[in-house]
């Protein structure tokens, strides 16, 4: 117990500042690493040639079309549920 008290008395302001900078550098490095990993997981793979670019373009176009169609259907059903003409 007395050793712990002696150790805490030896800690200076300079030591605390150095330790704070060291921990901040570790956190920044870790944050950058997590950012890179999440970017690799989320981003789609880069197309290598013209054929893959066209395939990616068609896939994206179909996804957009599908999203719009689902949105229209949901809107129509909500209007039929909450609209003035509920039969």
Image: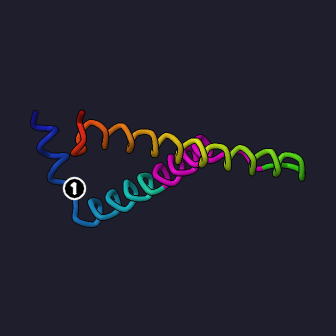
Magenta: predominant secondary structure element?
A: helix
Residue under label 1 = 11
Q: Residue furthest front?
A: 87
Residue at 51% over, 54% down: 32
Q: Is residue 1 above or below residue 34?
A: above
Q: Is residue 49 left or right of residue 19?
A: right
**Towards the viewer: 36 or 59:** 59
Q: Position of residue 10 (x, y in %)?
A: 20, 54
Q: Is residue 42 left or right of residue 11?
A: right
Specify the quadrant of the image occupied by residue 21: bottom left
Residue at 10% over, 33% down: 1
**Towards the viewer: 38 or 19:** 38
- Which stretch is magenta? 29-46
Residue at 67% over, 44% down: 62
Specify the quadrant of the image occupied by residue 13: bottom left
Q: Position of residue 41 (x, y in %)?
A: 59, 40
Q: Position of residue 50 (x, y in %)?
A: 89, 53
Q: Is residue 22 left or right of residue 61?
A: left
**Towards the viewer: 8 or 2:** 8
């Amino acid at each position: 117990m007395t050793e712990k008290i002696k150790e805490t008395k030896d800690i200076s302001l300079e030591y605390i500042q150095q330790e704070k900078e060291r921990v901040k550098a570790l956190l920044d490095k870790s944050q950058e690493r997590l950012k890179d990993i999440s970017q690799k997981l989320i981003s789609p793979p880069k197309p290598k040639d013209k054929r893959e670019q066209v395939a990616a373009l068609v896939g994206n176009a179909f996804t957009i079309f599908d999203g719009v169609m689902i949105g229209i259907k949901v809107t129509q059903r909500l209007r039929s549920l909450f609209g003035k003409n509920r039969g």
